[in-house]
């Protein structure tokens, strides 16, 4: 099957702030008939990519992980290349194996440059059409996140559909306030309140942000307002590499800061991803008190904690998710995604130097 300008492949951009439920939604969606033959492009932020391991694809799903940085900053070229090559790369017997594309951005991505790529790359424009932008908003944290993070504001402003996730964690009154706030930012977007990623796939299809020729003027105006022609600023960033005193013998992932525009750990001068790999099984009680201490010390600047853990005494991996100050219940996966059974943790922080994380670890060791 070929894609032509008369039959371009629909693309859904799935965005939403850190921990707002994008992967949970995707995991549910790909099990529905309207969404099974899809190519999922997952963009990881941070040196250790965990998202594609937490996404459980079906047999019919093709998955590509773009893990060399944040889509909006450093890997737009990768996205363009991936989409250009996808129709032949994911084909069997001359038949393309996917009917639509879902791009899951990092929680920090500014969607505007990604849209710009989709709309202007001369090889992509005839092959793909933007079907819609879906933005997840955490019903429990949404209001505070909009106040503090301009990325979340942009993700909201450009959505066709706003999915208010985790409704089970939000008070009715604050949900109503959030809905009002979202409507003020983006009155044109439909709002749906969901729980545990449950929504009919049909609701996400055919949002028709743009005509197939990509000329809808309000989007172009929006892009004009948001696209920053300046390249990202360069700054000094250094990572310590090697063992540190901590929970257990621990290898600290990382490398000396170089070529920051390609640094997968850096979103801007303030937001950094810190990755840690722990070689030996974790003592759960000790780890939990370490986490409590870190959250107490780092407060709101600890944006996201994600990890796949090898807990002493457990055969299966345990996945943990912290979203700002809320720690979601940990989940045991059925099996390790690959042979590497080391624990891996990613912390996404604002204005918290790596040394502080390390010093907390030293303090509790
Ligand atoms: N209580 C509750 N938890 C939810 C719901 N949806 C998602 N979660 C939890 O929220 C946490 C983060 O969800 P993810 O789906 O990983 O969020 P994400 O947007 O993909 O996260 P990033 O990729 O880090 O930006 C996980 O622990 C989920 O289980 C919900 O409706 N209710």
Image (tube, rainbow, N blue to C red):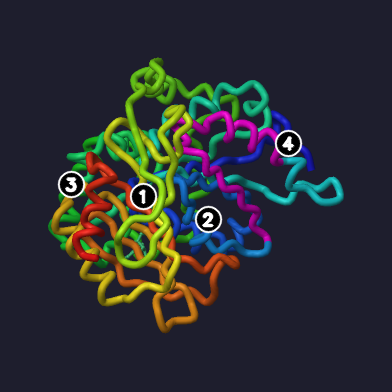
Whole-angstrom CA distance, mark 3 to mark 2, is 28 Å
Badge 2 marks a residue whose secondary structure is: helix
Badge 3 marks a residue whose secondary structure is: helix
Q: Which label's residue is closer to the chain start, 4 or 1?
A: 4
| Rendered image quadrant of residue 86 | top right
Query: From what the image shows, is residue 180 above or below residue 37?
Result: above
Q: Say which residue label 1 marks.
A: 136
Mark yes or no: residue 191 visible. no
Query: Label 3 crowding class (10 Å Cα cut-off): few <14, some 14-19, many 20+?
Result: few
The stretch in magenta equals: 60-86
Whole-angstrom CA distance, mark 2 to mark 4, is 27 Å
Query: Label 4 crowding class (10 Å Cα cut-off): few <14, some 14-19, many 20+?
Result: some
Proximity of marks 3 and 1: CB atoms separated by less than 8 Å:
no
Tell whether circle 1 marks a residue whose Cβ is less than 8 angstroms from ligand 1: yes
Q: Say which residue label 3 marks.
A: 144
Q: Quadrant of the C terminus?
A: bottom left
**Left or right of 225: which side holds 43?**
right
Q: Position of residue 33 (x, y in %)?
A: 61, 62
Q: Which label's residue is closer to the chain start, 3 or 4?
A: 4
């Amino acid at each position: 099957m070929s894609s032509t300008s008369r039959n371009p492949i629909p693309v859904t951009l799935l965005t939403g702030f850190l921990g707002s439920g994008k992967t949970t939604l995707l995991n549910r969606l790909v099990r529905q008939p309207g969404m099974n033959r899809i190519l999922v492009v997952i963009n990881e932020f941070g040196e250790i990519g965990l998202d594609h391991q937490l996404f459980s694809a079906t047999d019919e799903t093709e998955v590509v992980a773009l893990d060399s940085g944040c889509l909006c900053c450093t890997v737009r070229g990768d996205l363009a290349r991936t989409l250009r090559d996808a129709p032949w790369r994911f084909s069997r017997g001359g038949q393309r194996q996917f009917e639509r594309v879902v791009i899951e951005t990092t929680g920090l991505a500014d969607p505007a440059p990604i849209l710009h790529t989709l709309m202007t790359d001369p090889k992509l424009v005839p092959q793909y059409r933007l079907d819609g932008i879906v933005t997840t908003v955490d019903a429990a944290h949404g209001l505070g996140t909009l106040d503090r993070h301009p990325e979340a504001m942009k993700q909201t402003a450009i959505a066709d559909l706003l999915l208010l996730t985790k409704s089970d964690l939000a008070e009715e009154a604050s949900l109503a306030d959030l809905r009002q706030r979202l409507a003020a930012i983006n009155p044109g977007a439909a709002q749906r309140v969901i729980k545990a990623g449950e929504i009919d796939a049909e609701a996400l299809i055919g949002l028709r942000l743009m005509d197939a020729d990509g000329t809808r003027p309000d989007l172009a105006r929006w892009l004009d307002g948001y696209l920053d022609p300046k390249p990202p600023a360069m700054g000094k960033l250094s990572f310590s590499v090697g063992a540190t005193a901590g929970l257990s013998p621990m290898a600290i992932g990382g490398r000396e800061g170089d070529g920051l525009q390609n640094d997968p750990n850096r979103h801007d001068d303030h937001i950094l991803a810190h990755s840690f790999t722990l070689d030996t099984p974790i003592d759960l009680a000790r780890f939990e008190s370490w986490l409590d201490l870190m959250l107490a010390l780092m407060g709101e600047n600890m944006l996201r904690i994600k990890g796949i853990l090898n807990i002493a005494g457990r055969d299966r991996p345990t996945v943990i998710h912290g979203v700002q100050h809320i720690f979601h219940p940990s989940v045991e996966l059925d099996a390790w995604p690959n042979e590497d059974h080391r624990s891996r943790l990613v912390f996404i922080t604002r204005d918290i130097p790596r040394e502080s994380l390390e010093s907390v670890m030293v303090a509790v060791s």
